[in-house]
């Protein structure tokens, strides 16, 4: 059976505040929650979303330095979230 994560667990794993999750959901940049009522996601949904987010973003601007730094920061956050997810899996 697949692990179901609460909003608090997702925020903890991704190291974000609930407000950031709300904005991502509102913008359509986060997987739809499952079920009705309380917000829940499957662990697989989060893993797939992280994998899509870690795909390289083509640099089409003249602001290459800024974009590279943003990409590095994003990759660091994604890697930290993956490590946190792995630790979470091991403790459950």
Image (cartoon, rainbow, N blue to C red):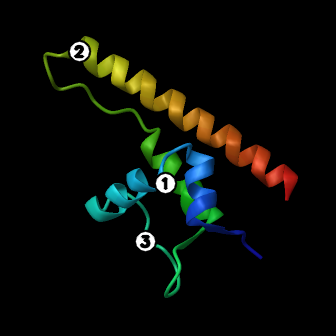
Q: Which numbered disc, 2 or 1, marks the residue that appears first in the sequence?
A: 1
Q: Secondary structure at mark 3?
A: loop
Query: In this rendering, which labeled residue sits more in front, label 3 or label 1?
Result: 3
Q: Quadrant of the C terminus?
A: bottom right
Which residue is situated farthest in the bottom direction here?
Answer: 36
The Cα atoms of the two marked residues, 2 and 1, are separated by: 25 Å
* Position in image of residue 12 (x %, y %): 61, 50
Residue 61, numbered circle? none
Q: How many marks?
A: 3
**Pointer 3 and pointer 2: residues touching (CB < 8 Å)?**
no
Q: Which numbered disc, 3 or 1, marks the residue that appears first in the sequence?
A: 3
Q: Which numbered disc, 3 or 2, marks the residue that appears first in the sequence?
A: 3
* Position in image of residue 47 (x %, y %): 59, 54
**How many C-alpha atoms fall within 10 Å of the one at disc 3: few (<14), some, or many (≥20)?**
few
Q: Residue at x 46, y 56 (%)?
A: 18
Q: Residue at x 52, y 79 (%)?
A: 34
Closer to the camera, 44 or 89?
89
Residue 49, numbered circle? 1
The Cα atoms of the two marked residues, 3 and 1, are separated by: 11 Å
Q: Which residue is mark 3?
A: 32
* Position in image of residue 33 (x %, y %): 48, 73
Q: Secondary structure at mark 1?
A: helix
Considering only vertical position in the picture, is 61 above or below 33? above
């Amino acid at each position: 059976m697949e692990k179901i994560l609460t909003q608090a667990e997702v925020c903890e794993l991704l190291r974000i505040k609930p407000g950031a999750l709300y904005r991502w959901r509102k913008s359509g940049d986060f997987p739809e929650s499952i079920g009705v009522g309380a917000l829940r996601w499957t662990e697989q949904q989060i893993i797939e979303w992280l994998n899509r987010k870690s795909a390289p973003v083509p640099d089409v601007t003249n602001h290459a330095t800024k974009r590279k730094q943003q990409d590095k920061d994003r990759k660091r956050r994604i890697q930290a979230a993956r490590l946190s997810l792995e630790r979470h899996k091991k403790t459950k």
